[in-house]
Image (cartoon, rainbow, N blue to C red):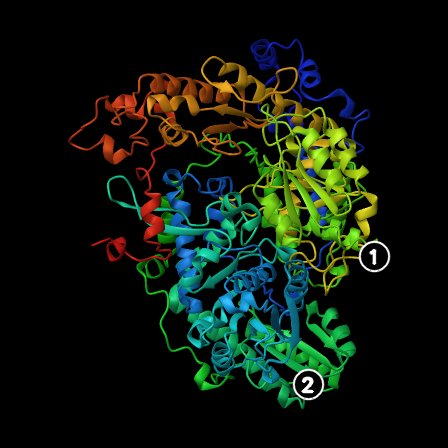
Amino acid sequence: MKTDAFALRHIGPRENDLQIMLKTIGAATLDQLIFETIPDDIRLKTPLDLDPAMTEYEYSNHISQLGNKNKVFQTYIGLGYNQAIVPAVIQRNIFENPGWYTAYTPYQAEIAQGRLEAILNFQTMVIELTGMEIANASLLDEGTAAAEAMALLFDVRSRDQKKNNINKFFVSEEILPQTLSVLQTRSAPIGVELVIGNHTTFDFSTEFFGAILQYPGKFGQVYNYVDFIAKAKSNEIKVAVAADILSLAKLTPPGEMGAAVVVGTTQRFGIPLGYGGPHAAYFATKDEYKRSMPGRIIGVTVDTDGNRALRMALQTREQHIKRDKATSNICTAQVLLSVMAGMYAVYHGPKGLRYIANKVHSLTATLSNALEKLGLQQTNTAFFDTIVVKTDSKKIKVIAEQNEINFYYIDENTVSISLNETTSIADVNKIVSIFASAKGTQASAIEVLSETNHFPSNLERTSTFLQHEVFNKYHSETALMRYIKMLERKDLSLNHSMISLGSCTMKLNAASEMLPLSNANWNNIHPFVPLGQAQGYQEMLRKLEQQLSVITGFAGTTLQPNSGAQGEYTGLMVIRAYHQSRGDHHRNIALIPSSAHGTNPASAAMAGMKVIVTKTLENGNIDVEDLREKAIQHKDDLACLMVTYPSTHGVFESAIKEITQIIHDNGGQVYMDGANMNAQVGLTNPATIGADVCHLNLHKTFAIPHGGGGPGVGPICVAKQLVPFLPSNPIVTTGGDNAITAISAAPWGSALVCLISYGYISMLGTEGLTNVTKHAILNANYIKEKLKGHYHTLYSGEMGRAAHEMILDCHPFKKNGIDVTDISKRLMDYGFHAPTISFPVHDTVMIEPTESENLEELDRFCDAMISIRKEIEASTLENKNNVLKNSPHTLAMLTAETWDFPYTREQAAFPLDYIAENKFWPTVRRANDAYGDRNLVCSCAPIEAYMEN
């Protein structure tokens, strides 16, 4: 056994399991199985050209040495990113804990109550700090949250505004530059015209439907927006405010000023800088706009017994239902980061947050006073944590960098300084000494902080916040540690059992990939530091881009997109820019098969494209003749085809090269959805099948954890002709020669977690990556054959094989009164998370075991599914009081004095022997979805207050 080979530890099945599995499958060798699965004409002819695999020990040394090339300065750049203290109790018990970072999106509420409560805390925190009525479960970053606010305000225009095509959106020149760039990207395709200007001279014309303001402004000036918002409202203009969340512990919240939407980032609530991400953005609005709000909302409902239960409400997979009519394509939140930010508020409470905000402001006021004593002009008349100083910027920069300090240099005569939670009096003295040195003088030592507020008294917050018990109870480390553990025990994560979600690829997130994320050399770098201070990051990111380009067969890669849906959008925007560069502005038709992921049509609509749906055949494959007919019909306006490969049905369609050629012959480009890339790596690739661009889900194929529903990363890889259009950033140069404006706020998106994928690829190498794909296909086909005769697999390839996932038909069970929801809930009693249900086909389950699961776990899962099949046979349409309909069974049910069910307690909770060794108990019975949507509560309030009379 080659103990130092990472692939040995990542891949589940052991060598001696192979023959057992192949015999079950009916293949002589693994290579025979692959031959029968993937069409030969798209197989790679040569191995991937990647560096040899590192051992885990070699990688640990390598990444440490690379991290040492990053220079961790004291950074006061600001612009929406601030150094923050990650409380050790949160770092150890959440950030570094697989019980939290390996969980899936909480679609199955009954086994996700801990995460749901933590996110509910986050939503409550956001609602109360912003002074708004409703908040979602986080968005990707501040820039994209602002763009979503613009889209919401566009969507909720009055009837007259829509009738008169009112499409102007005012953007304050105080907005963060990266936010402006994202707004520019997102506005044009949907027909919004941005007007950038000074909010004090805005004319409130009836041509405007909305506006966005920054609070405080990008360089720290605090404005009172009460009059602006009131005047806008009187002119039917709705106002969004991008607000610094820490400042809201001290300043009047935008909700109290009349804002319609408030957005921002929670990064400074205990989240590492990470060279730009991942960080949880927040989005809060008025209750009347909840149906247009993007992303996820966690809501309070009741379970079967009327007890309080939490669930995802309203927008659950909204884009899958509304498709191109959806208000957003976002299907990812930043759950792990929102959990951390919410827990930061729990740990500190309202008094702690006020203390931190007061300290930061006092330090800033003290610094301002000291610099003015040196004879320097500080131009912000009101501020929270950022001041602007008139001086010789070049001179200051030289001295500051010699002292390992970063400021933001607005121009040659202006320096901006943003202080933060980590700043001390000693740091302020050091900053003052730099400016004194530049003037050739010495400053007096500061020993006492200023107590004076440097903003108008009418902007000081007077309202209370975070009064709920959860924010006032867990302020010792022991108390918080136990609270976090209590929530963790309510959730089923990958550290308990296999999560066999089709299309979601819940594979191992190896410890050796995760460890570097806690290293300050990686997690404490501001995204806008000079490139010379981020050489480790630059080498790693360039190498990862090169690795992904090799794997996909493409010429270039951007890591900027922060989710798979954002990757889709980026790919389409790059295609759009390519057509426009050739004068083909009219090319706006996107052909999308009816079987496509719901985010595909939503993304196409956001990119300004018109969706034409093509048919699929009875066997699940694309109807080539229908596609050909529609491609020819729309050849003058065809922009692209969006295709998932292998298909959403888990099949390698043999006609794929013919399909891509049809599109090219008619002037279009081919976008490949990379959701199923785990079945391609090392065996085929998007370039080989004829695609021009693909997005990759690094949180699927390339081992970034799902984090309970985020972070996700969705880079795109592109063919040579599309490289010039890869996205830019307004502060740090990125992208191609004809780059589109920014897709997300940070230059390289969620750079910190890119370390995980870099480690995954570097430790597997060519052979390991190829074997991963082979074993993913092996494991899927093993389950397919083990369940044969018990469940019918709807789709398979021409030789009867599945790709890395399969769809089981559950429609026939309706004659027994059983549907897929019953199966999903019953699996919880067996200790498993349900597969993907009713997607892409209603009344089905889609199973993907991944390569990381060993034979024993695959057998346990199959035993559970076969046992459930027997329970289905014993059920009848007339009798709803059965073990499936009553599932999941909680500990409270099992230990109750009375038992009013026609089966035993043992049958309910321990239907198979293995369960007793590692029993997982759901903490609530089935959540009542309908009740929760009728009585939407998305904050920490007692359920009694919302019960129907």
- Mark 1, mark 2: which one is toward the viewer? 1
Return the x and y of residue 279 as percentages of the image width and height.
Answer: 56, 56
Q: Residue at x 73, y 47 (%)?
A: 540
Whether label 1 touches label 2, CB < 8 Å: no
Q: Residue furthest left?
A: 897
Q: Is residue 647 visible?
A: yes
- Give the Cα separation between the discs numbered 1 and 2: 47 Å
Which residue is under mark 1? 737
Question: Which numbered tag is attached to residue 442?
Answer: 2
Question: Hey, what amino acid is under mark 1?
Answer: Asp
State the image coordinates of residue 128 (x, y, percent, origin top left). Answer: 40, 66
* Secondary structure beneath label 2: loop
Q: Pointer 1: residues within 10 angstroms few (<14), some, or many (20+)? A: few
The tally of labels here is: 2
Residue 65's disc is: none
Quarter holding residue 907: top left
Q: Looking at the picture, how far across and down is residue 32, in whole percent?
A: 69, 13
Q: Locate the C terminus by quadrant.
A: bottom left
Q: Which amino acid type corresponds to the residue marked 2 in the rendered image?
A: Gln
- Numbered disc 1: secondary structure: loop
Residue drawn at (31%, 17%) of the image: 874
Where is residue 788 shown, x and y percent of the image?
Answer: 50, 14
Between 913 and 946, the one nearer to me in the picture: 946
Residue appearing at x 67%, y 37% in the figure: 643
**Residue 348 visible somewhere in the drawing:** no
Q: Is residue 181 left or right of residue 12?
A: right
Q: Is residue 864 above or below residue 450?
A: above
Left or right? Give the position of 249 relative to 901. Answer: right
Which tag, 1 or 2, sits closer to the chain's start? 2
